[in-house]
Amino acid sequence: MTASDPALASAPGAPARSTLLLLADGRFPAGAHAHSGGVEAAVRAGRVTDPPSLAAFCRGRLHTAGLVAASLAACACAGGDLDRLDAAADARTSSPALRATSRRLGRQLLRAARATWPSPTLDALAPRRPGPHQPVVLGLAARVAGLTPHDAAQVAAYESVSSPATAAVRLLSLDPFDATALLASLAAAVDAVAAHATEAARDGPDALPAASAPLLDLTAQQHATWPVRLFAS
């Protein structure tokens, strides 16, 4: 990160709440709408069938994949070393399919962030191949946009539950009101995970949480082989 970055130089002392809302908005063109967060496989296996089972799925995802993503995003926003963060993300994502998805979403988020908040910091990521993981790009985008590490963690934690909840509306013909109520019921848990992730990020990439969800990893590998599917992951 350079001091000459115009996006950082013009950032206000207190981050704009509307910027945080924009980054967390499911309509932000970063490709997340095409991914189910693993719930498509859970629906087909019969583990998610209704709002209560979806709530349990989302809560489990929040405290595993969501916590890991939130801590990576917070650390990237705080200025963590990109190479170490990339290695940390790889080590905490045991499924090759999920690693590929994370990098694909990272490239899509980077494209959207560069158009929204032009910055040399984000431009410097473009040539990296196969591209940074999505939470790392999220953290850098949040920093360039003038947000804090806690803000970045908050977005990542929220995304970990909003993606499967939104996908379940289509997969189960779920009432959108039920999905929204479910997300509201998880608000305190999302806040707690974001706070935990932000605190952990202060000690650098090597100290980040490594919570795992083996069933999500296994079903992600299976889902990637399906000839017909509604979502990319």
Image (tube, rainbow, N blue to C red):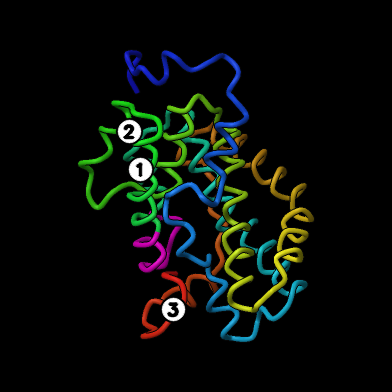
Mark 2–mark 1 Cα distance, whole angstroms, equals 7 Å
Of residue 119 and residue 223, the one placed in the foreground of this image is: 119
Q: Quadrant of residue 171?
A: bottom right
Label 2: state its secondary structure: helix
Mark 1 vs mark 3, foreground winner is: 1
Q: Position of residue 104 (x, y in %)?
A: 34, 57
Query: What's the amino acid at mark 1?
Result: Leu
- The boundaries of the magenta stretch are 90-101
Q: Residue at x 36, y 46 (%)?
A: 86
Residue 122's label in the rendered image is: 2
Of residue 152 and residue 168, the one placed in the foreground of this image is: 168
* CB within 8 Å, label 2 to label 1: yes
Classify residue 15 as left or right of residue 57: left
Label 1: state its secondary structure: helix
Mark 2–mark 3 Cα distance, whole angstroms, equals 32 Å
Which part of the image, by quadrant, shows the N terminus? top left
Q: Position of residue 37 (x, y in %)?
A: 53, 65
Q: Residue at x 49, y 41 (%)?
A: 73
Q: Is residue 2 magenta?
A: no
Q: Quadrant of residue 122?
A: top left
Q: Which residue is mark 3?
A: 223
Query: What's the amino acid at mark 3?
Result: His
Label 3: state its secondary structure: helix
Mark 1–mark 3 Cα distance, whole angstroms, equals 25 Å
Residue 183's label in the rendered image is: none
The correct choice, above or below, for 67 with respect to 148 in the image is: below
Q: Sequence-wise, which precedes: disc 1 or disc 3? A: 1
Of residue 140 and residue 212, the one placed in the foreground of this image is: 140
Q: Which residue is mark 1?
A: 110
Q: Residue at x 22, y 49 (%)?
A: 129
Which part of the image, by quadrant, shows the C terminus? bottom left
